Amino acid sequence: MFRKTRRLIPIVTLLVFAASLNAAAGGREATRPGRFTGSAHAGVPAERRTTPLRSDIPPGRLDRLHRQAEGTSRSVASRTSPRRSTATVGTSFAGVANMNPVASPSDSTGAAGPDFVMAAVNVHVQVFDRTGATQAGPFRLKSLFNNLPAGTDTDPKVVYDTYSDTFVLAYLLYNNHEDYIVIVTIPGATADKKSTWCPLVLNGDQIAGDGHQFADYPGLGFTADRVTITTNNFPFSGPGFDYVQILSFKKSKLYDCSLSTVPFTVLGGKQTRDPDGSKAFTIQPAETIGGSSPKVQYMASFDHSGSGPSHVVLWRLKFLNHNPRLARTAIGVGSVSIPPYGRQCGTTSIDTRWDTGDMRLINAYFDADTGFLYTAHAVSHVWAPAVNRQSAARWYEIRVVGNLYNSAIPRNGYVGGDGYDVAWPSVATNSAGVLFVNFTEGSSTLAAPGGVASTECLSLLATTVLPGQEADTGPVLVKEGEARYDFGTGVERWGDYSAINRDPLDGTQMVAFGAYAFNAGTIDATATTYLWNEWVASLSDV
């Protein structure tokens, strides 16, 4: 259950950030609202809410891979997960609604603090108390503050920094000329008072000399003394993918709203290539929990190698004498394929399928007390004794050691089952080391031979993986989908992520954020809906 009592969280002593950054570190300054810099450029990306995700794989080839992934296979990866769970749903409530302008996908995210729960979607943010009563908002992202650049808003991310009792909200704004990253720091105790929210705006293209860039799909993580944001950078107009951009902020500057400018460190271009020299894609900075003031930022990405062995890449960013040191190592995870499009509500037409993603990792979570980092994504998988491929969630546990190159993946596993399509998983551990996986699921009445026929509209589920185990305990239904989701012609956008974090008041509890197909309270698998709704739920392991 969410508790309404408050426990004070000690604020970590923050180191003073050096006045000048080493030039090799890519030092920059971002401005508070009121002053913006950046030249005008022609061209604007197509409307993101009704087009495929920007991926490092060309859209046409990505669509073919999704369709081909539905084929049969002689290989058998694992048995079907049991349809039971040790997870229990506690307090739960409706999060941010799909209000005007109606958007797709939901981009559901959020985090719980000691006093408040902050949730965000595409394109609003809202603050609740721990029982689900609205305390502030909903606010349109692009209208949160005066003097924000004009543009389209999208891709919010929210985390709760347990070391400093602070929420951090990051999102994107883009227009015909530029795109921007907006970072909002929010004191945990006054999150219900928007007057205490502190915005920072920076240009999405922070590396000069390589053409005009569009920053997409931000990642958001933190340690005891820094906040890290990552983006996938594309040419502002036209196809292609350029590189991942990493931005690192000292909290002592970022959280100080009296400063008109905030210095930060930039890494990108060849600095963010995978160990094999290829371009890294979607580097997810970890939310860090526990430890004794951990200051090393760990991150993860996935290096897909086609039909050959793929790798999870572990990244480490630390500072020595205020200079950044970025290292990475690739850990093999076997042959991995893009998942097929998902089914829902018993339908099989391609016009009713939903997008399960392109194998980018959805989040990263580093437990500094155990030294393990966790991450997950959707992949193509075969559940024995079936032969048809499904979309399944695959999670990884990475043992992080001092010599980064000796880090390993002692455990990984799949979540889903024959006849079910699972995607957009987010992961985190409770204080006992139990892994929670939060995900979307849908299914078709046409089960594979030997499987069980099922029909499920797009729903929010969760499961647990006990320490030392690889098989999950089976899913628990968090919020049932109410109708077939149909936002427009072709494959339906869904995701582009979910979120889960440890309750700062009770380490045995988790708080999950995701979306379900919303039909004004009527559950009818034969009906259609163009609406999703966010759902927020506390979870525990029994």
Image: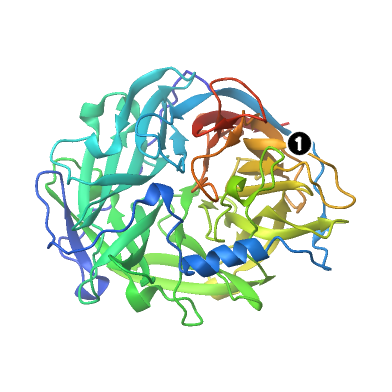
Q: In this view of the protein, which residue sits in the foreground, 447 or 154? A: 447
Task: Identify which residue is drawn at 47% across, 20% down.
Answer: 132
Q: In this view of the protein, which residue sits in the foreground, 416 or 329? A: 416
With 355 as the anchor, is 323 left or right in this view? Answer: left
| Location of residue 533 with respect to 347 vertically, above or below | above
With 170 as the anchor, is 87 left or right in this view? Answer: right
- Location of residue 172 in the rendering, given as x and y in whole percent from the top left corner: 30, 49
Question: Which part of the image, by quadrant, shows the N terminus?
Answer: top right
Question: Which part of the image, by quadrant, shows the C terminus?
Answer: top right
- Going by the numbered disc 1, the residue's amino acid type is Ser
Q: Where does label 1 land, which residue?
A: 85
| Location of residue 512 with respect to 350 vertically, above or below | above
With 390 as the anchor, is 325 left or right in this view? Answer: left
- Location of residue 170 in the rendering, given as x and y in whole percent from the top left corner: 33, 46
> Furthest-left residue in view?
35
Q: Can residue 440 be seen in this view?
A: yes
- Location of residue 374 in the rendering, given as x and y in whole percent from the top left corner: 58, 54
Quarter-of-image position of residue 98: top left
| Location of residue 269 with respect to 316 vertically, above or below | below
- Location of residue 394 in the rendering, given as x and y in whole percent from the top left corner: 66, 56
Task: Identify which residue is drawn at 22% across, 41% down.
Answer: 199
Q: Residues within 10 Å of mark 1 (few under 14, many from 20)?
A: some
Secondary structure found at label 1 = loop
The chosen color scheme is: rainbow
With 501 as the anchor, is 69 left or right in this view? Answer: right
